Every structure is written in C-alpha cells, then in structure tokens.
C-alpha cells in the first residue's frame, strides 16, 4: 500500500532503525518509545489489523515478536517485556504492528497511560538498535542446528 508508512519502511522509502528483518517480518525501534528499546514488529505484507492476517502467517509474526522479547532481555538487560496490539482504536498506523516494550520492575509503567520517552540523540537510538541486533545475532546463532559431523 503506497501511502502506508510501515509499507514504506518495508520498501526502504522511509527510514527506520531496523533491528531485524526476515522474509515475512520487520522489527524496528518505535520513534516515540514508551521505554528505550521499544520495538514494533510488522508483517512485510500490508494487513490493516491482526484480524486480517492469514492464520498461516501468525506463527512467523509471533516468532519474530518472541525473538525481539528475548533480545530485549539478552541485549538490554530487561527483566521482561510488554507485548500489545491495537486493532483500529488507538492504531496510529493502519498496518498491523505488535509493540514489544522492554520492562523492569518498578519502571513506572502502570495501566495504559504511559509517558513516552525520547532518545537523547540519534546516536543513542542507534546504540539501542545495535544492542538489540547483536542480541538477535547471538540468539539466532544459539538456535541454529549443528552442522552434520559436529
């Protein structure tokens, strides 16, 4: 969909701090994070809401969500994560996206009225993206099957 900001991120027309991409999904830093490291995971194919995503594509989407949550713990030292999806109401971009937010005990996030944080600079944003990318590389390497004869 040509006017969709997330589709433009998928095609490279719009820049984003991408932390992971595979054949079906892209994960990138939210430009207005609830907590630093907050990522959005999207399918590369345009679907407006979760209800529109074909059932056979859900496993891949949520495998990426799971990977990003693990990377937040491994790379950012998060104690856990918050995962959320809006369908139409409060959905700022009409392209299904899963919020994955790093969490720590007593981090001040209560209910759904969370103040947003801002990266202090482009360099800080890039550092968070780099930490997540490195953790993803380590996690994926540890999940890879051993080569024959090893």
Image (tube, rainbow, N blue to C red):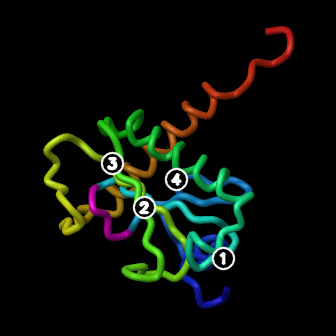
Q: How far apart are the alpha carbons under marks 1 and 2? A: 17 Å
* Residue holding disc 2: 99
* Residue holding disc 3: 102
Q: Does dot 4 land on a helix, a strand or a loop?
A: strand
Residue at the far bottom in the pictured view: 3
Relative side of 110 to 139, left or right: left
* Residue holding disc 4: 19
Q: Residues within 10 Å of mark 1 (few under 14, many from 20)?
A: some
Q: Is residue 80 above or below residue 62?
A: above
Q: How far apart are the alpha carbons under marks 3 and 1? A: 26 Å
- Magenta-drawn stretch contains 120: no
Q: Is residue 49 above or below residue 102?
A: below
Q: Does dot 2 land on a helix, a strand or a loop?
A: strand
Magenta segment: 31-35
Relative side of 110 to 36, left or right: left
The image position of residue 113, as x and y in percent, is 19, 69
- Magenta-drawn stretch contains 33: yes
Mark positioned earlier in the residue sequence (3 or 4): 4
* Residue holding disc 1: 46
Q: Tell me where residue 76 sits by quadrant.
A: top left
The image position of residue 125, as x and y in percent, is 36, 58
Q: Nearer the viewer, residue 7 or 107?
A: 107
Q: Residue at x 64, y 76 (%)?
A: 47
């Amino acid at each position: 969909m040509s006017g969709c900001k997330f589709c433009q991120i998928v095609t490279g027309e719009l820049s984003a701090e991408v932390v992971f991409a595979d054949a079906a999904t892209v994960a990138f830093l939210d430009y207005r994070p609830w907590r630093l490291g907050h990522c959005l995971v999207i399918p590369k194919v345009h679907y407006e809401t979760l209800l529109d995503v074909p059932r056979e594509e859900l496993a891949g989407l949520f495998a990426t969500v799971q990977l990003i949550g693990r990377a937040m713990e491994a790379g950012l030292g998060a104690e856990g994560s918050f995962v959320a999806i809006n369908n139409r109401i409060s959905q700022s971009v009409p392209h299904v996206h899963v919020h994955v937010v790093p969490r720590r005990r007593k981090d001040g996030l209560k209910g759904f009225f969370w103040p947003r944080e801002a990266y202090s600079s482009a360099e800080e944003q890039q550092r968070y993206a780099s930490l997540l990318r490195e953790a993803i590389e380590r996690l994926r390497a540890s999940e890879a099957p051993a080569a024959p004869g090893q």
